[in-house]
């Protein structure tokens, strides 16, 4: 019995280590020209999906991989809360917060509507709408367990959002000298329309530090709205369960959101204020968050079958692309 338990523990450790190994390979791949634009997260997912197609799912270490894709994912989202400065958003970004709310609503509703027209996969499309409207992979990962999305659907959504967000951020940088707007307006436009914090930084940085600061503030406003959005989905899922006579089907409360909120409050009002925290520690936590999220997405990526991907992902991708274009136009109008 003890030998069996020891063997299970070893396999569990091997599974977790395997996800971090692919995360490391993703980091190295992201240093190469071309891949440096899509980043470590998307590069690691590409490697994970490729591994699955050639070698199959590593069943012997499934327990560790599952731990990464679920437990480490929730830990990463909790730590992601430190990136949100609530005080700055509430004091300086209320106007941007309102615009962000409009963008989120339009992104989700338009993507879902287009998915119905295209007869696209509804779950992948919903996740893409959330990722487009809020904050990319982190938003998809937060909403997925609430709406009971499959791990494969979550991985597909994260992969698409990472790819398209990168494409749009590069397009934005090309448009800088063409658009008749100021640097600050360009930063605002980037922050309320692009997909992830990294994409916003890529697009806004060429316009200067002031434009970048405004872009990140606008983006943080959308991240702030992730919490109420999750509670809206909890309400809708419970309502759906009761209306379909599935009152016994419980909607799991996303307790990790409490951790997200708590760290957001601590990071905004405590750390660096009443409790001094060295900048090096904050940078370490930020890097740790990125690695945990990448390892978790590797675990999800290993569940993706390319055979199914072509049939299920193309139409949601089309719906999300159209939505992203419309969001860019709408954001440009309302800045």
Image (cartoon, rainbow, N blue to C red):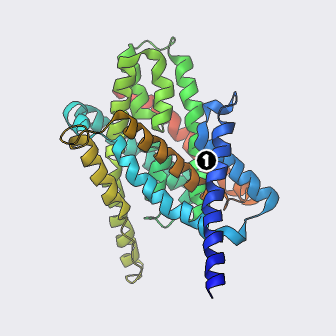
Horizontal arrangement in the rendering, residue 230 relative to residue 156 (left or right): left
Mark 1 Cα shell of 10 Å, populated few (<14), some (14-19), many (≥20) = many
Q: Is residue 237 above or below residue 331?
A: below
User: Can you give x and y, in whole percent of width and height, for residue 60 in the image?
Assistant: 71, 71
Horizontal arrangement in the rendering, residue 134 relative to residue 137 (left or right): left
Residue 107 occupies quadrant: top left
Looking at the image, which residue sits at the far front?
2
Looking at the image, which residue sits at the far bottom?
1
Whether residue 118 is visible, yes or no, is no
User: Could you tell me which residue is drawn at 37 percent across and 39 percent down?
Assistant: 282
User: Can you give x and y, in whole percent of width and height, for residue 73 in the image?
Assistant: 49, 57
User: Could you tell me which residue is drawn at 30 percent across and 59 percent down?
Assistant: 258
Q: For this rendering, which residue is in front, 139 or 323?
A: 139
Question: What secondary structure is marked by label 1?
Answer: helix
Q: Which quadrant of the figure contains the C terminus?
A: top left
Q: For this rendering, which residue is in front, 189 or 267?
A: 267
Q: Is residue 276 above or below residue 202?
A: below
Q: Which quadrant of the figure contains the N terminus?
A: bottom right
Q: Is residue 15 above or below residue 220?
A: below
User: Can you give x and y, in whole percent of width and height, for residue 277 in the image?
Assistant: 29, 39
User: Could you tell me which residue is drawn at 36 percent across and 50 percent down?
Assistant: 226
Q: For this rendering, which residue is in front, 275 or 84?
A: 275
Count the marks: how many? 1
User: Could you tell me which residue is drawn at 48 percent across and 46 percent down?
Assistant: 288
Residue 84 occupies quadrant: top left
Horizontal arrangement in the rendering, residue 49 relative to residue 172 (left or right): right
Whether residue 62 is visible, yes or no, is yes
Residue 62 occupies quadrant: bottom right
Q: Is residue 24 above or below residue 206?
A: below
Residue placed under numbered mark 1 in the picture? 159
User: Can you give x and y, in whole percent of width and height, for residue 156 in the image?
Assistant: 62, 53
């Amino acid at each position: 019995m003890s030998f069996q338990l020891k063997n299970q523990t070893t396999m569990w450790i091997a599974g977790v280590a395997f996800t971090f190994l692919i995360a490391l390979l993703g980091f190295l791949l992201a240093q190469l020209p071309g891949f440096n634009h899509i980043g470590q997260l998307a590069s690691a997912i590409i490697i994970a999906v490729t591994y699955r197609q050639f070698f199959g799912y590593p069943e012997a270490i499934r327990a560790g991989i599952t731990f990464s894709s679920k437990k480490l994912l929730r830990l990463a989202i909790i730590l992601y809360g430190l990136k949100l400065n609530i005080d700055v958003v509430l004091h300086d970004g209320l106007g941007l917060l309102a615009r962000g709310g409009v963008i989120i609503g339009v992104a989700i509703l338009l993507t879902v509507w287009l998915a119905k027209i295209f007869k696209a996969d509804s779950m992948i499309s919903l996740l893409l709408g959330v990722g487009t409207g809020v904050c990319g992979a982190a938003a998809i990962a937060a909403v997925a367990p609430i709406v009971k999305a499959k791990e494969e659907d979550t991985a597909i959504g994260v992969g698409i959002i990472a790819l398209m967000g990168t494409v749009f951020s590069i397009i934005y940088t090309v448009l800088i000298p063409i658009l008749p707007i100021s640097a600050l307006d360009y930063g605002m436009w980037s922050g309320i329309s692009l997909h992830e914090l990294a994409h916003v930084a890529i697009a806004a940085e060429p316009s200067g530090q002031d434009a970048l600061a405004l872009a990140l503030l606008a983006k943080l406003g959308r991240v702030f709205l992730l919490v109420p959005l999750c509670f809206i989905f909890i309400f809708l899922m419970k309502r759906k369960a009761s209306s379909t006579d599935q009152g016994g089907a419980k909607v799991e409360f996303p307790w990790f959101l409490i951790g997200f909120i708590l760290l957001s409050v601590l990071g905004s009002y405590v750390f660096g204020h009443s409790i001094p925290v060295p900048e090096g520690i904050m940078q370490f936590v930020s890097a740790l968050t990125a690695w945990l999220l990448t390892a978790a997405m590797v675990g999800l990526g290993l569940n993706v079958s390319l055979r199914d991907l072509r049939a299920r992902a193309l139409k949601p991708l089309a719906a999300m692309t159209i939505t992203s274009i419309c969001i860019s136009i709408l954001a440009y109008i309302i800045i």
